[in-house]
Image: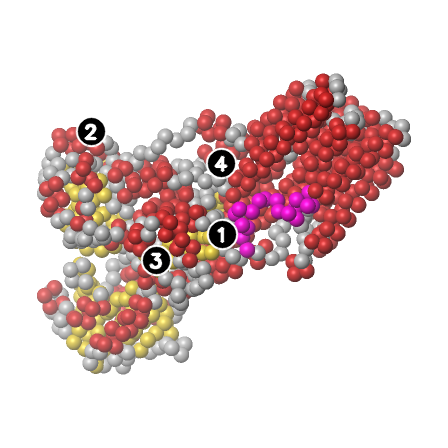
Amino acid sequence: METLLDKHWHHMEAAEVAQLLETTPERGLDQFESERRLNYFGKNVITGKRAKTGLERFFLQFHQPLVYILIAAGLVTAYLGEWVDSLVILGVVLVNAIVGYIQESKAAKALDSLSSSMSTEATIIRTGKTTKVPTSQLVPGDVVILRSGDKVPADLRILSFKELRIDESTLTGESLPVDKSSNTLTPETVLAERYNMAYAGTLVSFGQGKGVIVSTGNKTEIGRISGLIDSADELDTPLTQKITRFSHMLLIAIIALASASFVLGLLRDEPINEIFMAAVALAVGAIPEGLPAAVTIILALGVSRMASRKAIVRKLPAVETLGGTTVICSDKTGTLTENQMTVQAISSGGIQYSVTGTGYGFEGEVLDSDGNIPKNAALEENFRAGLLCNDARIVQREGRPGVEGDPTEGALIVSARKFGLQTAQEKATFNRIDELPFESEWQYMATLHENGDSRIVYLKGAVEKVIQCCMDSMLASGETGSLDVEAITKVQHEMASKGMRVLAFARKDLSADGELVRSDACMGMTFVGLQGMIDPPREEAKMAIEACQDAGVKVKMITGDHALTAEAIGLRLGLRGGDCSIGEDCPVMTGNEIAELSDSELIEKAPGIPVFARVSPEQKLRLVMALQKNGEVCAMTGDGVNDAPALKQADIGVAMGITGTEVAKEAADMVLTDDNFATIEAAVEEGRGVFANLVKFIAWTLPTNAGEGLVILAAILFGATLPIVPVQILWINMTTAACLGMMLAFEPKEPGIMDQPPRDPSRPILDKLILRRIGIVSAMLLICAFGLFKWELMNGASIEKARTMAVNAFVVIEAFYLFNARSFSRSPFELGFTSNTWIIGGFVTMMLLQCLFTYVPVMNTLFASAPIDLLDWTKILACGLIVYGIVEYDKKRSTPADKK
């Protein structure tokens, strides 16, 4: 029985499927047989790999090199007996761990959503009786009855149907409900075109049908996607990768320098206790204790700013990742488009018209080629036919218009309203008394209406079929003329080439007792026109794509929709490939073409293709992985179940908050509350600002650690007394990070941030210019702090006062350098000193703390400091001003004129 579940069910006759599964459409399975199969196949639920326990997730927060360094710093200070400092450092470690744990606890719940999507009841036939059972109890061979509004409980082969349409958009990306049938299909038919199958988790939007279950649980298509989510790699973000590399290098450097200083002391026969203290001071000085906390706070502020721009970030590092994104892979339906079918082109009486407005709102009008509102009898009948031969309704959902029923019919109601036809008035005037519902075999729908003493038949359907039903056509004057099939077909092809779905409309008059019967409904009709509709692109998405592409961020559309529709939307959005644009020489690649490519071929071709159509979930995953192999930092957007594996694999997954499935939201790193691609462009801008502030903080804090290390190293090399001791180093590092460095988190984005290309993913956090800047400031800290320390000792000052001078020199130089660090190319005067008032507040607070450090007796006792006079402060302030001037000169010398 197990081997049967791997067959091409869509390629088999319905009767053969039932026979293989040992069931019948009329009787279904017997009770004992269903219980036996339930024991054999298991429950119809999604099961995933074992998730990490809460304790495992918590302890993994400590598994980071920077945290190792901080823990080491805490243990070292505890060993030195500085319990307050030790508790502060270890407290920072604990807070970071708790924040990370809370963030991760909200993630990786996609499998729970998948399981809950199947926790409903299903109507089935068991032992010849219709009954309802929990979907978890369904087994292969059960016969399921489907009705409008039902969620499909498992993967089914359709046995019989009546006007059955299923919304598969969450699984395939197809924007319209799919007409189902029981006809046999070829083996190679792609998932989105298997019209004789119904898949678990999709929604019956119209009609009814009967199907036999062929797959349950993890064997369903939605279960297979669950497996893809499990297999998708949990990627480190570019930021975490770079900080990890940086932390490893820093850890090695600290151990090497501390070890070297220890060995050097031994060679000089210095006391072991002094050697040990010097090595500890060197290690503590080189550890950037504030960096992990600063990274968390800067990212958290970025999360807050993004939330105000309708982007909810679920994982902190995702904020920065967006800023480094080099390619955005976007789903089409609902993200780049409105996800609301809209009539945009009309043809009636041999004249073409356009319809303004988008979506299911009634704003808009019908215009001719000259922009005038037309008067055309055929056009009015065209709209009336679309309005009356219709079973949908426009309703309000959460303050926005939506459709209840078929989206295509919803679009026809809206277009009629834009022309001026009122639904209630038209239905009252033309009372419907009979109908012939749409069936795929006939390819049309017809309704019979009573208007006074006469009756009218309105018909809508596929263009080819409606033309066959017509004997003439209505002219703009209302009179009838000959049917020009060639002209109608030409207009149809023009609309279809723009990605539109085209419907034709017709009418005929009957006598007062005329009836509507299938045998003669499609005879003697008068053709009244065509309506072309499409799920239109969002106008703001077009502008956002242009901004992204101008900023060097490539945008690719990956959809399960038809290639022609995808190409038309891509053209209107202005999507570009490597050196081409859609509509010129950039091809659209289909899922079948992707399937024929090897991984290496896909890696080579994917970067130059802007639009991918008819793509399966596995292929979306392959595309993301291929782009990542090219060194791209890949963002993936989507809202359907079919998007979830690629959302999880991408460097940053972006789900839609309104139309997105829970599966997509839980697999994503960020959720857009307005489902708008334009929000992604805003988030990219915020992400770039966050990364810029992170780099500014790192470039500001590292000179302190390097300077402290150099001062200690110089003392060791020259056999001098330590200018600063470990407890003073911890004071400098912790207070300056909190009062000065953290203020850079509030630095506003610099002008032109979106005019720059995205960062090269392989580029280190610190480039040559920043490294040179760090080197300059570190050297100045060494010269000033060590120089002032030695000067004071030479002039008879106590060791406590000399060290206080060195500590204050470090703090004041850092405070002045903070103003330099606000920009790598612009001066504080150009930025404006009041553009970030937090900097001013931090500066004042730090100076007050230094006064406490210098003059309060308790602080003198705790930190071995001593009071200094006004002349001493003058020397210290002079050092700060000199460093500020040198850095500003270096900016001016190293910044090209066009970037100033």
Which image quadrant: the C terminus? bottom right
Q: In the rendering, at what x and y percent does residue 664 appear?
A: 38, 44
Residue on which disc 1 sits = 326
Q: Is residue 114 left or right of residue 679?
A: left
Label 1 Cα crowd, 10 Å radius (few <14 / some 14-19 / many 20+): many
Q: Residue at x 17, y 59 (%)?
A: 439
Which image quadrant: the N terminus? top left
Q: In the rendering, at what x and y percent does residue 671 appear?
A: 45, 46
Q: Residue furthest right?
A: 795
Mark closest to the chain's N terminus, 3 or 2:
2
Query: On residue 39, which mark appears?
Result: 2
Q: In the rendering, at what x and y percent does residue 530 appear?
A: 27, 70
Q: Residue at x 49, y 61 (%)?
A: 546
Q: Secondary structure at mark 3?
A: strand
Observer-nearest of 109 and 17: 17
Q: Secondary structure at mark 4?
A: helix
Visible residue check, residue 643:
no
Label 2 Cα crowd, 10 Å radius (few <14 / some 14-19 / many 20+): few
Residue on which disc 3 sits = 589
Camera-near label (3 vs 4) is 3
Mark closest to the chain's N terminus, 3 or 4:
4
Residue on which disc 4 sits = 103
Residue extent of the magenta highlight:
757-774
Q: Amino acid at mark 3?
A: Met
Q: In the image, is residue 207 above or below residue 838? A: below
Mark closest to the chain's N terminus, 1 or 2:
2
Mark closest to the chain's N terminus, 2 or 4:
2
Camera-near label (4 vs 1) is 1
Q: Amino acid at mark 2?
A: Asn
Observer-nearest of 542 and 449: 542
Q: Amino acid at mark 1?
A: Thr
